Image (tube, helix red, strand yellow):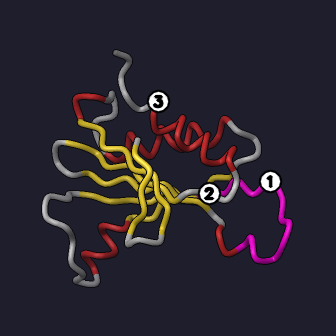
Amino acid sequence: MKQTLLQEKYPIFVAEIGKDETDCRNIDELVAYYQAKIAENPKVQFIGVFDHYAHTQKIGGPIVEGMTGAVDVIFCFGFAIPTPQMLAVRPRSIGIADMGDKFVISFMEAPMQPANEAMEAWTRGLRKAA
C-alpha cells in the first residue's frame, strides 16, 4: 500500500492488487468483503455503495482507459463529534476500480489513526497469503 498526495493536496492511500493476488474475482465480491469488515466493528456504520462508473457513463463524463467498473463503499467511523467542522471530513469511502487485470483500491487519509489503521488492514487482507 502506498501513501501519496492526489493533485498535490489530498492525502490518499492506494493499493494495486492483481486479480491473481486476491480471492475476490470482481467488484461485487470486493464490496461484500468490505461490508463484512465494516459489520465486524460496532463503531463503524455502513451507509451504502455508489456506482461511480455507471453515474459517469450516464452523464457522458470521461472515464480512464482500461477501467471497467468503479464504486465507492461509503461508511462512517464517527466515534465522536468534537467540533461541528468534523462533519466536513465524514463519512469515509473506499474506492474500488476494476482496471482489467488488477483492482485499484483507494481511500483518503482519515483525521483519526484508528480509522486509517482499520482501512489499511482491511485492504491488506485482500491479498492471498504468500
Q: Which mark is first along the chain, 2 or 1?
A: 1
Question: Circle 1 is placed at which residue position?
Answer: 79
Q: Are marks 1 and 2 in contact (CB under 8 Å)?
A: no
Select label 3 or label 2 by which is in front.
Answer: 2
Q: What residue is disc 3 on?
A: 125
The spot of residue 117 in percent (x, y) is 61, 40
Per the image, the residue denoted by label 2 is 110
Name the side, left or right, on which 64 lies relative to 78. Answer: left
Q: Quick one: label 3, few (<14), some, or many (20+) residues within 10 Å? A: few
- Residues at marks 3 and 1, CA–CA distance in whole angstroms: 23 Å
Q: Is residue 37 left or right of residue 105?
A: right
Magenta segment includes 80: yes
Residue 45 on image: x %, y %: 69, 52
Local SS, label 1: loop
Amino acid type assigned to the residue bearing label 1 in the image: Phe
Residue at 75% across, 41% down: 42
Q: Quadrant of the N terminus?
A: top left
In this rendering, the count of numbered labels is 3
Amino acid beneath label 3: Gly
Residue at position x 61%, y 59% from top? Answer: 47
**Picture quadrant of residue 17:** top left
**Most distant residue in the front direction:** 8
| Circle 3/circle 2 CB separation < 8 Å | no
The one of 51 and 10 positioned closer to us in this rendering? 10
**Could you tell me how far apart the alpha carbons at marks 3 and 2 are, in whole angstroms?**
19 Å
